């Protein structure tokens, strides 16, 4: 377990008969960014809440930096910065005071608190609000303050739950950039999200969960080869003939072709990156003049939908 | 900036930190001002009333001191309801726990920090109330009986027992209004009714209730300290029943028992409580 800084062993959580998390076994190695994906109610937040000491598991274990989160909570949380849901802050305090409070609880010196408060508030663009009471803050500002609080002590493990929720588009881009910058600083990042594009953009690995069960853990770089079916939109210069559509249907990997008297075809295709390139060549060989050839769902979306639909089935 | 590995602070220093920021909450809030205002206004009214109705010349210094202490139980209950009933549950109800609990601090340290802060503001309010009474007594009689300081000490113990029960309610209840109302009515109505029912109908001394035990605050100023009287000990007419008096050591033990049991149960409930919604 030397390199594994976040480990769960048969982690389960039930609420009066409903199993929110079912024997989850997860290992996150140091300095990786793992996206934790799943539909609403899949068990993502339950996992994150157990990992941050907000919930107790019904059975199983969770370890952070080798410390049991339920038995050695203080030590387990020492090197962790967490943003869980959109936290509220004490309305009578301002960001500087909130960061001072949490910094003191973590044993930071006055100087460290002062310099890190300045740095983190600048990072989340709240410097101008540092002495304004939090009760005046919008949801997005509170989310950014939560990120500043999570980064205050320069933690080696960062756990975030739907961190871009509640942010405007600009805020979402900024938070993504912050997380990307953290990746460069030898941080281990475990982030739950339902935004697949965001996860694919930021993370090295993805862990897919549904109905409390872990479906798959995969390298993001390998996902293109794993997704079973992807939908490809093909825009043409002229309407395809019936025989052309029929021959496309028979091409290797083609599962379905949809054409509704427009210049576009939607092809459901099964195959990796190389097979997709072959398809493009073969379409051209069949006399189709192609303007665009683009995948409608990302590889991750395709894999996600495949796995979730299997899980439902 | 890369920081060196931070040494976790001791639990006692974390308790002080929590207490400090809780105090800041109270000091920046309106509840403390309202409570101090009530303490000042009521104590001033009650110390000048004997002069206004011209009975002050008939009163001994002990009678004079006993008069304003009649309101004190209300002040203690208001303090417990204001500062204790919402203290823990607000972390869940107002979702501030999502920011506080993922820090490396145990829930028992958070509990203790919050409890000490609530106690300190309550002591401050009680101190203001007693300060007015003691100052008025000194001005009028040029003497301050030492029993008033025992009374002050008993008030601190009483408010601590009420606070620990308020914290128990706070660790279990979901809504702040329900918790505050329960704490208020428990000490103002429910427990006093139980005391009266036990005395009047069951002829039993309610030595085990916190409200009856708290009566030592005023009884200590009765010189000599009274004792229980059985029916017939004194000729008192057709409704001759027991007269029950709270004894100091027994009452202090009862109040300490409430503090201990309520605190342990409250810490346990707080530790077990989860951030579900």
Image: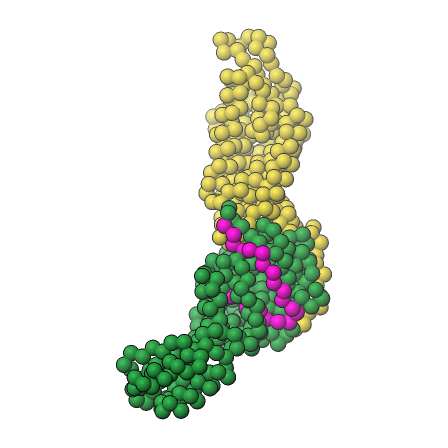
Rendered location of residue A258, percent (x, y): 34, 77
Task: Please tell me which residue lies in front, A186 or A148.
Answer: A186
Q: Residue at x 59, y 68 (%)?
A: A189
Rendered location of residue A239, percent (x, y): 29, 86
Q: In this view, does B68 lie above or below B10?
A: above
Chain A pictured colour: green
A3 in the magenta segment: no
Count of marks overlaid on the render? 0
Chain B pictured colour: yellow
Predominant SS along the magenta part: strand
A30 in the magenta segment: yes
Q: Residue at x 36, y 78 (%)?
A: A257
- Can residue A148 be seen here? The reply is no
Q: Residue at x 57, y 10 (%)?
A: B231
Task: Please tell me which residue lies in front, A309 or A24.
Answer: A309
Residue lying at the far left in this picture: please name it. A261
Task: Please tell me which residue lies in front, A42 or A81.
Answer: A42
Q: In this view, does B42 lie above or below A196?
A: above
For the record, the magenta segment spans A18-37
Left or right of B156 on screen, residue A270: left
Res B127 quadrant in image? top right
Res B8 quadrant in image? bottom right
Q: In this view, does B91 lie above or below B162?
A: below
Q: Which residue is drawn at 32% across and 89% down?
A: A237
Task: Please tell me which residue lies in front, A228 or B156.
Answer: A228
Q: Quadrant of the C terminus of chain A?
A: bottom left
Rendered location of residue A176, percent (x, y): 52, 73
**What color scheme is it?**
by chain
- Can residue A251 be seen here? The reply is yes
Q: In which quarter of the image is the N terminus of chain A?
A: bottom right
């Amino acid at each position: 377990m030397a390199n594994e800084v976040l480990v769960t062993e048969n982690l389960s959580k039930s609420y009066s008969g409903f199993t929110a998390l079912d024997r989850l076994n997860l290992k996150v190695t140091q300095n990786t960014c793992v996206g934790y994906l799943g539909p609403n109610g899949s068990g993502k937040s339950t996992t994150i809440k157990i990992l941050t000491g907000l919930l107790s598991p019904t059975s199983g274990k969770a370890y952070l930096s080798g410390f049991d989160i339920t038995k050695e909570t203080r030590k387990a949380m020492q090197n962790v910065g967490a943003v869980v849901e959109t936290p509220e802050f004490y309305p009578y305090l301002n960001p500087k005071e909130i960061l001072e409070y949490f910094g003191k609880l973590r044993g930071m010196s006055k100087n460290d608190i002062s310099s890190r408060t300045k740095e983190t508030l600048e990072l989340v663009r709240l410097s101008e609000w540092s002495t304004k009471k939090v009760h005046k803050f919008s949801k997005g500002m509170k989310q950014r303050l939560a990120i500043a609080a999570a980064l205050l002590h320069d933690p080696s493990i960062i756990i975030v739950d739907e961190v871009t929720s509640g942010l405007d588009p600009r805020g979402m881009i900024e938070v993504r950039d912050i997380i990307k910058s953290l990746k460069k600083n030898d941080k281990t990042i475990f982030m739950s999200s339902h935004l697949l594009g965001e996860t694919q953009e930021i993370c090295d690995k993805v862990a897919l969960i549904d109905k409390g069960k872990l479906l798959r853990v995969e390298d993001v770089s390998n996902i293109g080869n794993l997704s079973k079916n992807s939908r490809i939109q093909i825009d043409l210069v002229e309407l395809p003939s019936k025989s052309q559509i029929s021959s496309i249907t028979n091409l290797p990997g083609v599962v379905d072709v949809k054409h509704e008297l427009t210049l576009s075809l939607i092809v459901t295709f099964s195959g990796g990156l190389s097979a997709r390139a072959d398809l493009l060549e073969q379409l051209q060989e069949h006399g189709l003049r192609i303007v665009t050839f683009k995948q409608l769902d990302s590889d991750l979306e395709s894999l996600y939908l495949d796995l979730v639909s299997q899980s439902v089935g | 900036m890369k920081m060196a590995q931070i040494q976790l602070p001791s639990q006692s220093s974390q308790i002080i930190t929590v207490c400090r920021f809780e105090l800041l909450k109270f000091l920046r809030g309106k509840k403390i001002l309202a409570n101090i205002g009530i303490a000042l206004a009521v104590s001033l009214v009650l110390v000048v009333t004997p002069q206004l109705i011209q009975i002050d010349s008939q009163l001994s210094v002990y009678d004079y001191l006993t008069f304003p202490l009649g309101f004190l139980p209300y002040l203690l209950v208001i303090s417990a309801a204001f500062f204790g009933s919402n203290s823990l549950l607000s972390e869940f109800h107002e979702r501030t726990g999502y920011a506080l609990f993922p820090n490396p601090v145990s829930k028992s340290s958070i509990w203790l920090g919050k409890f000490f802060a609530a106690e300190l503001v309550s002591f401050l309010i009680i101190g203001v109330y007693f300060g007015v009474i003691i100052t008025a007594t000194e001005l009028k009689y040029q003497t301050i009986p030492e029993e008033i300081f025992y009374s002050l000490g008993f008030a601190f113990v009483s408010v601590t027992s009420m606070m620990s029960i308020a914290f128990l309610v706070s660790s279990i209840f979901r809504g702040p209004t329900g918790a505050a109302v329960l704490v208020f009515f428990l000490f103002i109505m429910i427990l006093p009714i139980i005391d009266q029912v036990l005395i009047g109908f069951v002829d039993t001394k309610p030595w085990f209730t916190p409200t009856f035990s708290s009566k030592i605050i005023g009884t200590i100023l009765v010189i000599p300290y009274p004792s229980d009287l059985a029916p017939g000990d004194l000729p008192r007419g057709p409704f001759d029943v027991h007269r029950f008096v709270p004894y100091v050591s027994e009452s202090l033990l009862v109040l300490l028992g409430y503090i201990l049991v309520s605190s342990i149960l409250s810490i346990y409930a707080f530790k077990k409580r989860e951030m579900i919604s």
